[in-house]
Image (cartoon, grey):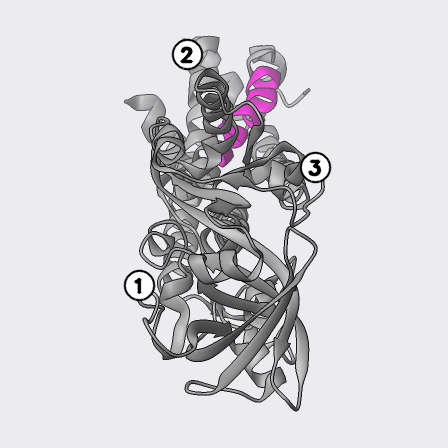
Amino acid sequence: MMSWKLAVRNLLRNRLRSLLAIGGIAVATAMLIWNLGFIDGFFDLMVRGSTDVEIGHVQVQDKLYAEQPATIDYFEWDDDLAETIGGTAEVRAVTPRVRLFGLVGHEDRSFVGRIFGIDPATEPEVTVMADGIVDGRWLDDEMPEAGPAEVVIGKGLGRTLGVGVGDELVVIAEGVDGSMGDGLLEVVGVLETGNSRIDRQAALLHLEEAQFIAAMDGAVHEAITAIERPPAAMEIARQMQTRLDAEGYDQLKARSWQEVEPGLYELLVYGDTANNVIFGIIFFVVALGVLNALRMSARERHREFGVMMAMGMSRVKLFFMLGIEGLIMGVVGAVAGGVIGGSITWYHSVYGIDFGAFLEGDATYMGVSFAERMHFAMDASTVLTPMIGLVVVTLICSIWPAIASIRLDARDAMTGRT
């Protein structure tokens, strides 16, 4: 208890120096918490912008299609295959798709678009495209018995073609037999997802209509899945591949989103490395400030330490006292920084940060739009990791001054010869 009282008294002796050191720790802690929340939120937006909107967490495709997408590389879709894929551990939902490239337009204007044949009933269980409807409605579960088929288009595509809900479009695409297929469609919905590849180019039709246009009766190009833990997609893909091979579907390949979007995955890995570098730099700068404060404080008290040792204080207790000073500085600074940084990061996690205020137009990166608000990611580790790290750094910094002090000769210290 005496060591704690002495440590507190010593820190209060030079309040300005102690406050500057504690303030540096607090600022560094707040910066690290905010940076973690920002980076994790940025990467979370990137991953969700690709996986939740378009590619899913694990895809199943023909092996040739996986290497080089081509309309002719398809596979038959049936309940047995759906059960094999959906029965893999942690798979929440699975939906089939047909992917085509072709002309989408009307008599005045056309555009090369990405044509998706989807199952309107199961697609919302895997992706969030149905939630992006900004005008009109989502596709009905069943195709209309008469009249043109239904289509939902991206907002950017609708703007390019000058069409909206209620207008008619024609799609023309190459079939798997080499013929040119076409279909008359009525726009029933317009969507905006934040994924520029979907918003600017996509036309979503009923699966049966896309199969008819491409002469792919009963066949699809891929099955898209949603899993419980997106970061574990590579392991789930390996398990799914094992099931496919065991059930005789060895011509199919299961690919995780990390494999489908290697650039995005590499960005995440690079981001983790960059984060560690930032942490290291800030820790080093804070360590220099704390070390200087503790070292100066210890040097000014050499005579006092000599008296204390002459009166019977053991070197172990002296070492412990100086360590407590570092601990108090670290804890007080980390808690203050945790409150400040945690509050700011929490605010941005709830209300987001508006990139549109700093950017002109619809800024995108790897197909994901940043014109809207980006919400920070925050959990207990976002706050605790910087706090604990800086407390440990402060404790480590107190070791050198403490060792230098306990090695003093009591007589020399009292006479000022140190």
- Label 1: state its secondary structure: loop
400 part of magenta stretch: yes
Task: Find residue 313 and name its label.
Answer: 2
Q: Give the range drawn in magenta.
A: 389-405
**Residue 398 location (% of width, % of height):** 54, 26
Q: How crowded is mark 1: few (under 14 residues within 10 Å), some or many (20 or more)?
A: few
Is 341 situated left or right of 281 in this image? Answer: left
Residue type at the position of mark 1 = Glu
Say which quadrant the N terminus sits in.
Answer: top left
Residue type at the position of mark 2 = Met
- Label 3: state its secondary structure: helix
Q: Nearer the viewer, mark 1 or mark 2?
A: 1
- Label 2: state its secondary structure: loop
Which residue is painted at 61% across and 80% down in the image?
105
- Alpha carbons under labels 3 and 1: distance apart: 33 Å
Is 16 situated left or right of 367 in this image? Answer: left
Residue 132, located in which quarter of the rendered image? bottom left
Let me know if residue 375 appears in the view.
no
Q: Nearer the viewer, mark 3 or mark 1?
A: 1
Q: On the image, numbered disc 1 is attached to which residue?
A: 142
Which residue is painted at 32% across and 30% down in the image?
5
